[in-house]
Image: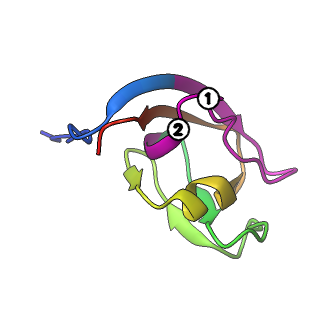
């Protein structure tokens, strides 16, 4: 059993289902208001690579995330700079956006 903890100190402000391919790195489309302060996303159906420094990951470079992984980002720069690419086949990423709160 997997337990997923969402950031309770912020309010949910949006959701995005994203198809990540191996042809081009993609980032999230953030809700316009209020400011996004946290993202929790799941990886479904394969392996992706992630970079949060503003550079594009490649199919062989970046942090590897696997099917079933759940990631929480709570740093504004990391959220804005997050880029994802699939290692091979298309992968689904489902993300909840949180804002407000503290």
Does residue 68 sit above or below 96 in this rendering?
below
Query: Which label's residue is closer to the chain start, 1 or 2?
Result: 1
Does residue 73 sit above or below 4 in this rendering?
below
Residue ranking furthest to the right:
23
Name the residue beneath numbered marker 1.
31
Name the residue beneath numbered marker 2.
45
Give me the residue at 64% from left, 35% from top: 30
Instruction: State which region is magenta.
Output: 15-42
Figure quadrant of the N terminus: top left
Viewer-nearest of labels 1 and 2? 1
From the top left corner, tell me how far across and down residue 52 is, in percent: 61, 67
Secondary structure beneath label 2: loop
From the top left corner, tell me how far across and down residue 55 is, in percent: 77, 71
Callout 1–callout 2 Cβ contact below 8 Å: no
Quarter assignment of residue 29: top right
Give me the residue at 38% from left, 52% from top: 72
Give me the residue at 69% from left, 33% from top: 19
Other-residue count near label 2 (Cα within 10 Å), few / some / many at <14 / 14–19 / ≥20: few
From the top left corner, tell me how far across and down residue 27 is, in percent: 71, 47
Residue ranking furthest to the front:
102
Quarter assignment of residue 74: bottom left
Other-residue count near label 1 (Cα within 10 Å), few / some / many at <14 / 14–19 / ≥20: some
Q: Does the magenta stretch include residue 47?
A: no
Quarter assignment of residue 85: bottom right
């Amino acid at each position: 059993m997997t337990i997923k903890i969402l950031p309770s100190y912020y309010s949910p402000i949006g959701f995005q289902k994203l198809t990540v391919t191996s042809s081009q790195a993609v980032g999230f489309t953030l809700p316009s208001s209020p400011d996004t302060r946290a993202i929790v996303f799941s990886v479904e159906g394969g392996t992706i690579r992630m970079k949060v420094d503003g550079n594009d990951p490649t199919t062989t470079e970046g942090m590897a995330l696997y099917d079933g992984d759940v990631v929480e980002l709570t740093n504004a720069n990391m959220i804005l700079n997050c880029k994802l690419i699939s290692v091979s086949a298309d992968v689904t990423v489902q993300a909840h956006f949180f804002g407000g709160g503290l």
